[in-house]
Amino acid sequence: MRKLRSGEYIIARNNSRGVTLIEILLVVTLSALLMAGIIPFIRSVNDVWGIGSSKTEVLQNGRIALEAITRYIRQSARILTIPGSNGNYVKLRDPDDNYNIIFYHNVTGSPYYIGASGVIKDNDLVMRSDESGAYTDSLLASSLENFNIIFLQEDGSLATQANEVKTCKIEMQLSDAQGLSAGELDLEGIVTLRKEPRILVPIWAITSAGIAPSNDRLKEFSGDIEVTGFRIDNISYDSSDCLSVNLADGSCWVADTVNDRVVHISASAEILDVITGFNKPDAVSVDEIHNTVWVADTGANLVKRLRWGGSGWVIDEFSQKFKSPSSVSVNPNESGSEVCWVADTANNRIVKLSSAGQILVDAVRKPWNFSRPRSVSVNRNTGVCWVADTQNNRVVSLQPNGNLGDTYRGFKRPRSVSVNKTNGECWVADSENDSVKKITSSGSILEFRGFSWPQSVSVNFLTGNCWVADYGNNQIVRLNAEGDEEFRIGNFSSPVAVATRP
């Protein structure tokens, strides 16, 4: 080794071209990084593929296969195919709802048998096991004599439809050709499926020319239902509270802003009612107990209450000098009657109305000093109302009598709030901070990043999960109760609102 000039060394042999120390270090570093990626991959492939036929390997591969199946089923977006009497296959959707996953046992009785045609489609992720052990590329396990998946309802009876599935029982019987004893032959796994909320999402794109529909649709997940037969044209990206789900029957109400109407859609995607006579309605809130629907009729400067009149919906109008009300949130449980909180945006006030439209709370000017509040969410258990005080960059809670509760700062143009009535926690779409925040019951603020201008949040009060309309990323995101991101559903165009049904 000899020094050429300051800071440079070469290792030379017989005066041939040398290699610098920097080059050596670079090669070593790149090799280490490459092996760091390759070794786990090799280990992963060896763990999952059914390689080897010894007694130990067959048992190991069987257990790995069982673990893989249970994990995928537990995390699946939904089950697509319920087996009949022959349960040696399952077809489901991946957690992000982008492609199919198929597990099957390669025997002639399975519809996914290698000899079958037209069953497996392009982009399907297929994982198979094999009866004979002859296939070393089996992605689950080889030397597997029997493979059975049983889908059960909540009461333990056999499920006949995908939406009935609550529990999945997986049974494997390994081949005894490798000297396995009877007690070692059988493996069993039980999967309890998480009961996920239905999620309804209107999808819109915002272009440089303004607001334009793209894949404009209302979509329901867990059943993959897409509403057809009408268009929800040019919905405003300000309408983060334009959806509300009836918790009793799963139907959804939509404030169809530009078409000046409110639309009622069944849980099975049938259009039940189309109610006209509105002027740019921005928000709806359903009271399933009293069978009423409250509407922020923004362009008319009114709040309206729909009630069933026996042969049709009757519309009650409440003026109360509203100016561009943008959000409503009904509480059906206050002293045996319904009340509705209103974000009276252009008047910089929050109002609480009785079922007859009388003002019970008029929070305007001091001490509240709201500025363009955009969203309200009432806790049905406590009566506390949460407010996204958008222009003041804060979130505020109001007591049932209207007294100012707690004030939380550090937000930037918060657009949507959703309170969990079970534990009192409030989720916030902190739009211009590109984050979602949770205000805990103790008053702490937890921040979760990775979003781009989130527009709407909706919390499931049973599971604590929070769904987010991640507008800028064109995705719907689910966070668990702790705020950990569980998965993202892509292929959307600027979603503006979400609503969940526990």
Image: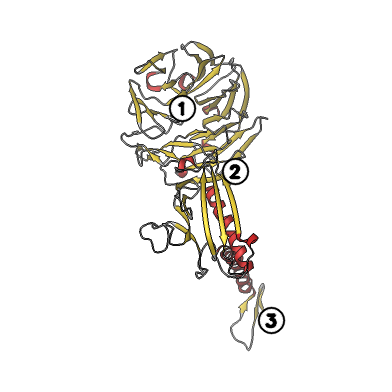
The quadrant in which residue 110 appears is bottom left
Q: x, y percentage for residue 13?
A: 64, 86
Q: Is residue 328 left or right of residue 175?
A: left
Name the image quarter holding residue 4. Answer: bottom right
Q: Are marks 1 and 3 in contact (CB under 8 Å)?
A: no
Which quadrant would the N terminus be assigned to in this image?
Answer: bottom right
User: Mark 2 — residue?
Assistant: 484
Does the CB distance between marks 1 and 2 fall below 8 Å? no
The x, y position of residue 85, in whole percent, is 46, 51
Q: Position of residue 277 (x, y in %)?
A: 33, 20
Q: Residues within 10 Å of mark 1 (few under 14, many from 20)?
A: many
Amino acid of disc 3: Met
Residue 141: image tag: none
Looking at the picture, does residue 192 appear above or below residue 286? below
Q: Between marks 3 and 2, how big is the CA–CA gap?
A: 54 Å
Residue 303 appears anywhere in the view: no
Q: Earlier in the sequence, mark 1 or mark 3?
A: 3
Which residue, given by chain and number where applicable, does mark 1 sit on?
Answer: 246
Q: Amino acid at mark 2?
A: Asp
Q: How many marks?
A: 3
Residue 259 seen in the figure: yes
Q: Which mark is residue 1?
A: 3
Q: Nearer the viewer, mark 3 or mark 2?
A: 2
Label 2 sits on a secondary structure element that is: loop
Q: Relative to residue 69, is residue 477 depicted above or below?
A: above
- Relative image position of residue 92 (x, y in whole percent): 47, 50
